[in-house]
Image: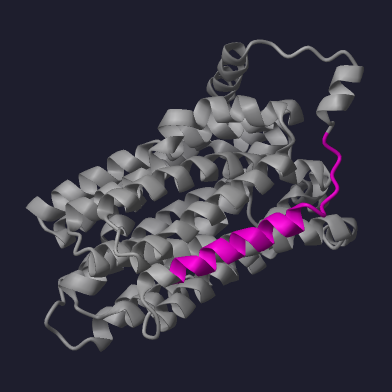
Amino acid sequence: MSSNVSEVRTGRFLRFWTAQTFSQVGQRFGLLALPVVAIETLDAGSKEVGYLTASLTVCYLLVGLPAGAWVDRWSKRATMIRSAVVRAVVLALIPVLWLSDHLTLTWLYAVGIVVGVASVFFDVAYQSYVPFIVSDDAIEPANARLEASAQISAAGGPAAAGLLLKVVSAPLILAVDAVAYVVCAGFLATVKDSEPSRRQEKSEGVQRPRLANDILAGVQFVVRSPVIRRLCISVGVSNFFATMVMTLTPLLILRELELGTTVMGIVLGVGTLGGLLAAVTLPKVRTRLSAGTVMAGGLLLAGLSMVAFPVAGSLAGEAAALPVALLILGQFGMTWSAVMFNITQVSVRQRACPKDMLARMNASIRFVIWGSMPLAAVVAGWLGSHAGVVTCMWIGVVGSFLTALPILGMDRLIRAEIGPAPTELQNA
């Protein structure tokens, strides 16, 4: 384990880690600021917020699969740099349009789509990049550290944005996103990795098949791998129902409970400290529990924690302290459990897949996982406006408990397909 720890302290990993942290900060500011701009600046309702969420995720359906094939052909580091720059430019348009009195919901949807496309390429490259900067034995510790910074950003980003919203208007908050993405691109430009360059592949006579064949190979790998196929189903169902709940969370806090943007930032920020705790403690947990146990337990506990959201919504009109406490507790438990699951399942996927197919594998899974999110967002918006926000959230909670079913028997499949993890070997 000591070699694994020293490896994630090397300069190239630390620079990549720093870049990822700035990207996460920008993303967290944006996830809070965009719906606030829609709700408070442009007077959006449930349907419009659902459409905005869909605009950020529908791109996985449009370009998700070819993105994986392209990223496997391109430099993953260069892809992340370009994606960060694109997001910086388009997000900087929002405050410009607002200051010139030209900002509309249509512009927000358009920006959401462009940001979504850039995010597809960045995320596929990002999840495929770790095995090129650390060894297989260090993948899980590296993912835990990356997730730790993501959770710090998730904790501090919304809280800071909520406080800033008291001083400046929501559209101006998006300027912070633009700066964060520029810094991210700058750090990525300094990272060195072991990925073969296009020039090196040409000199070695590597011949790439047609794009359609590359895409098909990625899909077939996911379908034929018992481990990755089950993970794909589980995470796809989980994201669908979690998206239903999270799409309506701003409306629950701002409209149903009338708690204000500052409280929303604090609830989301303090609640997600659970994710940081999960990232920090996962290495110790994994020395005692198998990957399958951690993943199944995480999904079940996430569903149980999600119950706090509709329960808090049913307390509208009561003293604010109780619903706020429930929301913080629910967010804390949900992110703690979800992060335990996510770090483990991503590490399993990265170990199970050949390096030259990582991007296609990740893109195929994200096509299913994130492709379900725009549908979930639209469903949430429609149900929220017809059946009510709280009722829609209860549907999301009930559905979330189904996500652990594909994980049953996962340890046996992992041992058969890729062998025990390094932590399991050390404790055998």
Q: Which image quadrant for residue 214?
A: top right
Identify the residue at the far left of this view: 386
Q: Magenta stretch containing residue 37, yes or no?
A: no
> In the rendered image, is residue 428 in sight?
no
Image mark count: 0
Residue at image x 42%, y 44%? 404
Query: Relative to residue 228, is residue 8 drawn left or right?
Result: right
Residue at image x 74%, y 53%? 188
Residue at image x 47%, y 32%? 367
Q: Which image quadrant for residue 95?
A: bottom left
Colour mapping used in the image: one colour
Query: Relative to residue 51, is residue 422 drawn left or right?
Result: right
Front residue of 173/13: it is 173
Front residue of 389/274: it is 389
Q: Magenta stretch containing residue 180, yes or no?
A: yes
Q: Which image quadrant for residue 385?
A: bottom left
Query: Relative to residue 198, is residue 315 drawn left or right?
Result: left
Residue at image x 70%, y 64%? 284
Q: Which residues are magenta?
A: 173-195
- The image shows residue 112, relative to residue 173, as above or below, that is above
> In the rendered image, is residue 92 in sight?
yes
Image location (x, y in percent) of residue 237? 38, 40
Image location (x, y in percent) of residue 37? 31, 65
